[in-house]
Image (spheres, helix red, strand yellow):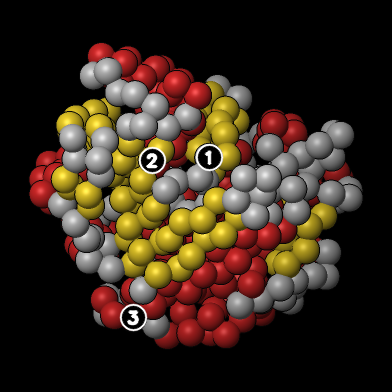
Amino acid sequence: MIVPIHLENQTPVHYDVVIDTLPQLVFNRKVAIVTNTTVAPLHLETLKSRIECNELYVITVPDGEAYKTLETVENILDELFSHKLDRKSLLIALGGGVIGDMTGFTASLYQRGIGFVQVPTTLLSQVDASVGGKTGVNNKYGKNLIGAFYQPEAVYIDTAFLKTLPKREFSAGVAEIIKMAVMFDKAYFDFLVTADLKDNERLEKIIQRSVELKAEVVNLDEKESGIRAVLNYGHTFGHVIENETNYTAYLHGEAVAIGIIMANRLAVELGLMREDESNQVKTLLEKHDLPTDYHIKDVEAFYDKFFLDKKSANNKIKFILPQGIGGHVLRDDIDGDLLKKVLKTFSKELA
């Protein structure tokens, strides 16, 4: 199955997201695979066996969000220069969202831009991170604050890679699936309530639907000037949680799950979502062993970190909130005292 991406910019970009067994990939150019120390022993040989190219190199970096930095990108760039890759060369990202983001960012920088291909190996990257061209790294101020919108030449999604995925990583990907359903498709959410994700055929359909929803949004708004911001439901809160915990306590999808709960709490307070709808979302997240609670130690500090969010502008915080299940609204007029009241429900402070 193929989901097409069509971006009609000044220079139109068209590429396919292919959901199937990884095909034979033929490139008449130099290729460098970028992967990490966890994925390489599991899947590198499979990918190499599918590639025909002029010269093939492998660049392996440490695993983990803590290494999603400019320093790691510079190390990758050094290896590309040492292998004398040229402007027609290609990078292939083999891994999860961290590898995909860094590889895409590196590709955007090397000799002012070379091609790259995504081969995502986690559920989170298959349904979300590999599609749409967001690339970047973290710094001490927050997540993905340094980066570029840079589209891949293709995305190849093979569910066989998920067979080696730890259960916790798989659940983290489910959070992004639930995010898409709550924002855009009530029928899809209802389907997920009873869907068996252990059934591979069913899982492929779920991945396809998530990618279709994301593709529709990205095609309308590549650079997040409008509706694409909706894809960050749960992320405004989740990114603060990741930053507060130094990207070590929670996987990205786990932080998003907690962020969804916080966003829903705010939506209920604003009358955008009923309490029972919020509980339905919480139940589905917990069904997949995702965390739904977080202790905020310092409400003021948590609140201040919102202003580092990429969606914030003119000293206003933009929140993506559910409008029931299957609908969404963007708000940048939330009263600070009301927001702090909601945050205090996640702390030991008295609201």
Where does residue 295 sit, x and y in percent of width and height? 57, 45
Q: Left or right: where does residue 77 sit relative to residue 140?
A: left
Image height of 250 relative to 34, above or below: below
Mark nearer the N terminus (2 vs 3): 2
Q: Amino acid at mark 2?
A: Phe
Are there few (<14), some (14-19), or many (20+) residues within 10 Å of tag 2? many
Q: Nearer the viewer, mark 2 or mark 3?
A: 2
How many discs appear? 3
Where does residue 321 sit, x and y in percent of width and height? 72, 61
Q: Quadrant of residue 1?
A: bottom left
Can residue 172 be seen here? The reply is no
In depth, the one of 61 and 170 nearer the eye is 61
Residue with the mark numbered 3: 202
Q: Nearer the viewer, mark 1 or mark 3?
A: 1
Residue with the mark numbered 1: 150
Secondary structure of the residue carrying numbered label 2: strand
Image height of 209 relative to 112, above or below: below
Could you tell me if the residues under marks 1 and 2 are in contact, i.e. CB atoms within 8 Å? yes
